[in-house]
Image (cartoon, helix red, strand yellow):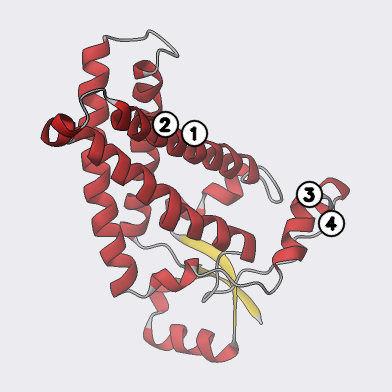
């Protein structure tokens, strides 16, 4: 397979990614204020920002989900067992011994098996958990009369916090993995420019050169 710099991240894809990153940071920061982990800023302001940003992010996720299915990009996040153990071994052992990454990115399969599994669990388990628990918490005024001692409210709040810490763990690991291999800058640049070096068949390369030359670089 030939390797070429190809535009694999559309403008919407990049806008969605960075808007999500900024929103998640604001939610972590304000959420920590609500939990009493810091005292920067008024509590009431933190509640307002947390609520508004969360609802805006939920709307963005709805649009992103629609985009993923209409463009068939959802297939990039379907996990496959082939090569999973090799990639896991690389991150646990091989990376510290200077070994080459066992997975070569391809146009139709940008994410390695471990990445695909992590993103799949994030999008199908953690994100729905934090969406649902957050919305149920916000709607407490509608069902609070069924929970006079706030027992269920406590359960919902704890589930929301647990999902938030799980997502925070994902973010920390994600940022750490960006420092492995070619370096942080090389990993982040594609999500800024849209272009990434990926492998492709001769047929795919010929098709892009003929039909979509703007997607090829160099």
Gap between marks 4 and 1 measured at Cα = 32 Å
Tell me the crowding category of disc 2: few under 14, some 14 to 19, or many 20 or more residues within 10 angstroms, Cα based.
some
Residue at 22 percent of width and 16 percent of height: 45
Q: Earlier in the sequence, mark 1 or mark 3?
A: 3
x, y (%) of residue 150? 27, 25
Secondary structure beneath dot 4 equals loop
Q: Is residue 10 left or right of residue 142?
A: right
Tell me the crowding category of disc 4: few under 14, some 14 to 19, or many 20 or more residues within 10 angstroms, Cα based.
few
Q: Identify the residue at the far bottom of this view.
A: 203
Does the residue at mark 1 contact the one at mark 3 (Cβ under 8 Å)?
no
Secondary structure beneath dot 1 equals helix
Q: Earlier in the sequence, mark 2 or mark 3?
A: 3
Q: Quadrant of the C terminus?
A: bottom right
x, y (%) of residue 75? 45, 73
Q: Is residue 81 left or right of residue 93?
A: left
Q: Which residue does the numbered mark 4 point to in the structure image?
A: 99
Residue at 60 percent of width and 50 percent of height: 186
Gap between marks 1 and 2 measured at Cα = 6 Å
Residue at 32 percent of width and 58 percent of height: 11
Q: Which residue does the numbered mark 1 point to in the structure image?
A: 165
Instruction: Report the front residue among 162 and 10.
Output: 162
Instruction: Report the front residue among 216 and 14.
Output: 14
Residue at 45 percent of width and 83 percent of height: 208
Q: Which residue does the numbered mark 3 point to in the structure image?
A: 92
Q: Which residue does the numbered mark 2 point to in the structure image?
A: 161
Tell me the crowding category of disc 3: few under 14, some 14 to 19, or many 20 or more residues within 10 angstroms, Cα based.
few
């Amino acid at each position: 397979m030939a390797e070429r710099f190809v535009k694999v991240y559309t403008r919407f894809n990049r806008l969605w990614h960075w808007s999500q990153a900024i929103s998640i940071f604001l939610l972590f920061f304000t959420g920590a204020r609500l939990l009493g982990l810091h005292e920067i800023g008024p509590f009431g302001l933190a509640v307002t920002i947390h609520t508004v940003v969360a609802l805006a992010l939920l709307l963005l996720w709805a649009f992103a989900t629609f985009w993923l299915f209409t463009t068939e990009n959802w297939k990039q996040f379907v996990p496959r067992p082939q090569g999973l153990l090799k990639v896991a071994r690389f991150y646990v052992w091989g990376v510290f011994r200077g070994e080459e990454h066992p997975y070569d990115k391809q146009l139709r399969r940008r994410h390695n098996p471990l990445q695909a599994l992590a993103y799949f669990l994030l999008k199908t388990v953690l994100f729905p958990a934090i969406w649902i628990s957050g919305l149920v918490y916000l709607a407490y005024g509608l069902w609070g009369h069924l929970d006079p001692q706030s027992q269920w409210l406590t359960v919902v709040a704890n589930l929301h916090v647990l999902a938030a810490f799980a997502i925070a763990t994902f973010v920390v690991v994600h940022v750490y993995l960006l420092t492995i291999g070619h370096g942080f800058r090389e990993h982040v640049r594609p999500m800024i420019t849209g272009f990434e070096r990926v492998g492709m068949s001769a047929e795919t390369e010929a098709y892009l050169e003929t039909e979509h030359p703007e997607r090829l670089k160099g």
